[in-house]
Amino acid sequence: DASGWVVGEHALAVLSSYGLPVLRSRAVATGQDVSSGAAETVRVARDIGYPVALKAVGAGIVHKSDIGGVALDLFGDEEVRKAYTAMAGRIGPAMTEVLVEEMSKPGVETIVGVVQDPSFGPHVLFGLGGVAVELLGDSTLRMAPLTDEDARRMVTSLRGSALLTGGYRGGEAVDTGALCDILLRVSRLAEDLPEIAELDMNPVIARPDGALVVDARLRVALPPGNNP
């Protein structure tokens, strides 16, 4: 959009091109009457397979859950139709698309990101994610390129790392190798594409059988020194 943010289906496609594990999803344009948009969203949901999630997409929509722009665990046509209609009513024309996405199995929510430093280049961020990421502030930042050991230390250095490695109230360990692989792929992406000024993958759901990128956005800007 005009702010330089790439969101929804397009952001996930960039990540997928680097081998990052993303959920199956498809965007539906909402520039039509609500009943037609709901019908098209139902058709796409059937193609993806239930259960699905709906997520509002639009310029200026950052915290979707704060404005009622997320509907989860929708198990049939009527649930999708009602969720779409309610979302369109709440958000209005600011919602230019709705992303229909397969539902992820539950797991530990983490965040992976990139910040470009004007002096030192890209840095990769990892932390506990979800809607409380700003409140928890449990994250670590390292300069790219990452080594295997860098990625491992990032995953195990959080204050809440027991949520990932097992042992917290009998919790099962997640696939930390899958998280390390995601960090290494993001590090490569950040080096290859310096025009990505910021990348925010939140949440990345970590489970014993792997990890999946559920939502992402990236901001495109000319690298320092390349401004006309």
Image: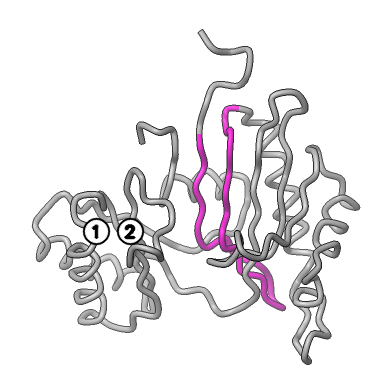
Q: Look at the numbered discs 2 and 1 and tell me whether their residues touch, using CB distance below 8 Å.
A: yes
Residue shown at the point (34%, 53%) measured from the top left: 57
Disc 2 residue type (three-letter): Ala
Task: Kindly report the distance in space between the C-alpha atoms of the residues bearing marks 2 and 1.
Answer: 8 Å
Q: Is residue 13 shown in magenta?
A: no
The coloring applied to the image is: one colour
Q: Position of residue 225 (x, y in %)?
A: 63, 12
Q: Relative to the observer, which residue lies in front, 11 or 127?
A: 127
Q: Position of residue 99 (x, y in %)?
A: 35, 59
The magenta segment is 195-219
Residue shown at the point (77%, 53%) measured from the top left: 140
Establish if 121 lies above or below 55: above
Q: Which residue is mark 2?
A: 56
Establish if 145 lies above or below 30: above
Secondary structure state at the residue bearing disc 1: helix
Q: Which residue is mark 1?
A: 91
- Magenta-colored segment: predominant secondary structure: strand
Residue shown at the point (18%, 69%) measured from the top left: 85
Residue extending furthest bottom? 170
Disc 1 residue type (three-letter): Ile
Secondary structure state at the residue bearing disc 2: strand
